[in-house]
Amino acid sequence: MSTIIENKDTIITKTSGFPSNDVMLDLKDLKKVYPTPKGDYVVLEHLNLQIKKEEFVTIIGHSGCGKTTMLSMIAGLNPISGGNISVLGKHIKGPGPDRGVIFQAPSLMPWMTALQNVMLGVNQVFPHATKAQRNDIAKYYLQKVGLEDAFNKRASDLSQGMQQRVGIARAFAIKPKVLLLDEPFGMLDSLTRGELQDTLIDIWNKEKITAVMITHDVDEAIFLADRVVMMTSGPRAKIGDVLDIEFERPRTRKTVLEHDDYYKYRKHLIDFLEH
Amino acid sequence: MKQSVTLGKVTKFMGLGFISTFKDLFTGKLEKEDYKAFLRKVIVPVASVLLFLGLWHLGANALYNVEAEFRIEKALNEQGQVAADEMAACIASGDTSCQPNTLPSPSQVWTSFQSLLNDHALISADKVAFKEKTAALNEKRVAEGKDPIVYTGRPSFVDQIFRSLKTVFAGFFLALLIAVPLGIFIGLSPTLKSAFNWFIQIFKPVSPVVWYLLVFMIVKTLLIDSSEDSSFSISFIAVGLCSMWATLVNTSMGVSSVDKDYINVAKVLKLGNFQKVFKIILPSSLPLIFTGLKITLSVAWMVLIAIELLAQSPGLGLFVWEEFQNGANDSNAKIIVAMFVIGIIGFLLDRLMLSIQNWVSFEKTDAI
């Protein structure tokens, strides 16, 4: 019985796909299995998702449903058990700087300064640029995230929010094709979280890098996304529902909150999560 | 962003925070709520030292009396009443020929300490005089291509200390040069780890004495043609081999347990192996490497004494052994002086390592 429904879902998502030349990131029939002594544990199965160029997709779902597993598979940090992932039609092989990651913990090298942390990536991605050019790139993105006064501060001396700003600068500075965000604001207080959402969306509006972001926060999901993807609870998690958010960009928090559709979207998401 | 350097910061950095409390006391900067801290940090340690000295004094006195009574009784049993009375009078008079030989009292130790310093001053003066006397002759000898005449008198206590420090640092750097690179390779490669694990587990608990004998066997043969004194090489190599295990284990553990997030960052950025090791793995394992080095230095200092003693290599270990063999009236007191000197230098070496660790590593470690 359940396999029939799964197949039906697969068909729906496949047929409602976008023209393939617009597709940046394509997950086909993705599967993740963790072997356990009691037999295989299937985290994800028959997961299909296509993400267009310059699209911002947020992924929402219950804890432990496999969102992070999916994201780390896209990043190439977690091996794929079945199906495939392609970026611009090319199957991914392991991690690479074409898929920038903003981790849940800022994951900065605490012994480096903010600038050195960003330069670590920039040096790697632009090896042919001059030292001054690379410095300029790193400084530009640190300015963009509001850290023009903290270039030479050690990462360990920065607050959690500022560290995550460096994380954002580091991810954008390597100019990835796809940006993967794993609950990047989950560890911050709500005030800082709001500020960082604004920073993220400002810089994203300029760069328009295809982004996939995991979040637990319904409001964050609506505010940032073009599409909200809802995942079913595991095991054998897959895409449960997709909601298009049709607010115009650039958005401000005020216009979004005052928009008539906002509560409709919000209700849709909460209904899915509570069902 | 310039930070002013104050006494408080410097002493805290070096793990000697109590010094600034003293300073606050004398400059009258102590607040009311600081008195509790003052009591805990100054009064209690001073009181415990005084208590220790008092107990020591009483204990030494008791042992002295036991030994004195034994001597008198022995004289009585073997030579009769007259000899016993003579012995009692002799002991009471403080004559060095018949003093009971036992645990010296704190004041005797202090006297010996001063006499050792005087002895050092004498020997230093002697050395200077010797140098002046032989300066002209040595110049001539060097011009003729001969070896200059060197001072061959006995070393003073202070010379022995410096000789010991030289040995311990030579051993420490040997341990560092072997253990840190090897630890990094073992930490990076699970294959190397399983290759070396049995080796580490078996050799780690081996006693310094056995290490010394092993090194002795090898170095003696290697230097068979050399006329040089091999005792220094043998002792520092043995010290290095005894003490390197802590650094080896800590380094490999630090390297193999780098935060997974950092490794993920390196993977996403596709850092090369060289960059991964030098920019991420090494800096992040520095705190553990330094913990290992700190243990290594203190172990090196601890085993040094035993090894110098065995190797007959000049230094504090040999000093202690010679005093013990010597059996002079103040030998025991000199041994106790050496014990305190060894302890205090060990403490200072530990603080030195802590300062270096806080200097180079991103994690600040407090003194224990």
Image (tube, rainbow, N blue to C red):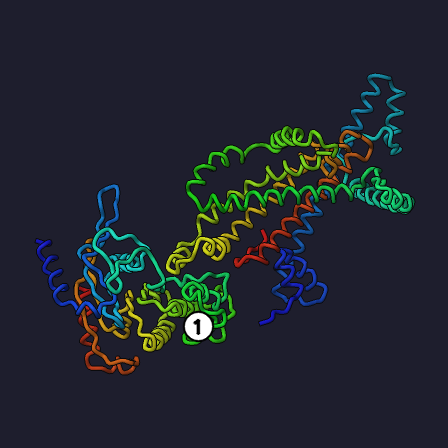
Up/down of B183 relative to A126, above or below: above
Q: Secondary structure at mark 1?
A: helix
Q: Is residue B40 visible?
A: no
Residue B61: % across, % down: 76, 35
Badge 1: chain ID = A
Where the N terminus of chain B falls, by quadrant?
Answer: bottom right
- Mark 1 residue type: Ile
**Is A8 situated left or right of B140 in this image?**
left
Residue B187: % across, % down: 46, 45
Q: Quadrant of residue B299?
A: top right
Residue at coordinates 74% horizontally, 40% vertically from top-left?
Answer: B338
In the rendered image, the residue lying farthest to the front is B144
Up/down of A4 relative to B139, above or below: below
Q: Quadrant of residue B76?
A: top right
Residue beneath label 1, please? A137
Residue at coordinates 46% horizontally, 72% vertically from top-left?
Answer: A133
Residue A51: % across, % down: 23, 67
Q: Is disc 1 surrounded by few (<14), some (14 to 19) or many (20+) residues within 10 Å?
A: some
**Is A135 situated left or right of B10 in this image?**
left
In this view of the protein, which residue sits in the foreground, B162 or A207? A207
Residue at coordinates 57% horizontally, 57% vertically from top-left?
Answer: B360
In this view of the protein, which residue sits in the foreground, B305 or B126? B126
Residue at coordinates 83% horizontally, 40% vertically from top-left?
Answer: B147
